Image: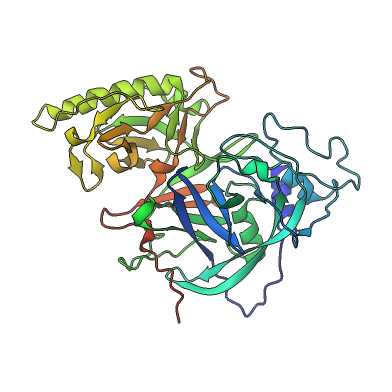
Amino acid sequence: MARVLLVLAASLVALAWPASCQRLPVLAPVTKDLATSLYTLPFHDGANLVLDIAGPLVWFTCQRGNLPAELPCKSPTCRLANAYPVPGCHAPGCGRHWHDDKTCTAYPYNPVTGACAAGNLVHTRFVANATDGRNPVSQVNVRAVAACAPRKLLASLPRGSTGVAGLAGSCLALPAQVASTQKVANKFLLCLPRGGANGDGVAIFGGGPLHFWVDPSDYTQSMDYTPLVAKQGSPAHYISVKSISMDNTRVPVSERALATGGVMLSTRVPHALLRRDVYRPFVDAFVKALAAQAAPGGPVARAVRPVAPFELCYDAQTLGNTRFGYWVPSVTLALDGGRGWRMPGVNSMVDVEPGTACLAFVEMKGVKAGDGRAPAVIVGGLQMENIVLEFDMEKKRLGMRTMPYYMQCSHFNFTRSA
């Protein structure tokens, strides 16, 4: 059924593209909201949408001028809009009437609060720029289908945002719609910024190349790849992790435990969440590895009162500093394919108040150890910052390349070329 829906999706939002036109990827800047640690991109007419790489839909608070899609329940688009029911939401608006002409209803949901609401589908446009991988080239209007939502669904989202851009592997997520309309590959590059003075990051829908003004090389040509794993009933992006290491010492968590529930990538949470059977061995291994660093004459980290929701917090002045953040044990995920995802201090520690830094890995709440209904690990936004990630839904793989210490995601040239 999923493959059938993918085929049908190609005809739902397609726009004729003249053969004489070069089919370029579509570029958008990505901004980090420091108050919520969520990421946004401009969508159209001043509307900013929150990025949700696990979200199956594009939705926003509709205004006058939005063209109703008026799609019947029997349309393939309606089925796609309701392909991933949200736990706790009402049954899809069509109920048992998937074969009649009743107007389709979708159920967009808030990725932070989990709240959902009924909404009609509308035709809209994503106003962005085509890019050659170095600069914006020309403005494009990408036709898309989105769901309307009431303003109450904006609770806990960044101030000024008007909805959510889902970037999951579903047919009505933004990458698939850009691919269908612009006739580019169904994949996207994402470089999440650290926020503040570090400037904006970048998202490119349709693939590379990707060049930064301080480095002429194409960042898509030297990536490490690991398979993207599909989980039944979920549009989210998962990866297979074989083991977790703290520096060079393996954390005593079995591959089976990590496979139970899998490892999910998410921009909904600012830091990593670990299921209890993974979290306890993880923090114990971190404490031991941090203590071992002091043995050869390194700084002795002084633990301080924890700051919720974190368990392990330290006096920042007692942590050594490097080009890659605090000098703490690096966390490495051993990936399917033999590569490792290394997370140094800049991706594993967070400053929570002046003089206090905490380990940015938190135990999941309300989830029992070994419960396969929950991911074993949710990799959060902080862990993915300043890394070029390529989500390739066609080849079902995730590419990654860590930025050098002297570079930032903001080093893309957003000035339009002449």
The quarter of the rendered structure image containing the N terminus is top right
The quarter of the rendered structure image containing the C terminus is bottom left
Q: Where is residue 205? Give x, y as percent.
A: 54, 60
Q: Residue furthest left?
A: 297
Between 155 and 384, the one nearer to me in the picture: 155
Q: Residue at x 71, y 58 (%)?
A: 10
Q: Where is residue 397? Give x, y as percent.
A: 50, 47
What is the count of numbered marks? 0
**In this rendering, would 338 be left or right of 124?**
left
Task: Say above or below: 391 vs 214.
Answer: above
Q: Residue furthest right?
A: 100
Q: Residue at x 28, y 38 (%)?
A: 354
Between 94 and 269, the one nearer to me in the picture: 269
Q: Residue at x 83, y 54 (%)?
A: 70
- Image quadrant assignment for residue 213: bottom left
**In this rendering, would 415 be left or right of 12?**
left
Q: Where is residue 192? Give x, y as percent.
A: 43, 51
Taking the image as drawn, is residue 19 in sight? yes
Task: Say above or below: 131 vs 80.
Answer: below
- Image quadrant assignment for residue 380: top left
Q: Where is residue 27? Give x, y as percent.
A: 51, 64
Q: How is the image coloured?
A: rainbow
**In this rendering, would 349 be left or right of 185?**
left
Task: Say above or below: 268 vs 302.
Answer: below
Q: Residue at x 24, y 24 (%)?
A: 303
- Image quadrant assignment for residue 119: top right
Between 240 and 44, the one nearer to me in the picture: 44
Taking the image as drawn, is residue 393 in sight? no
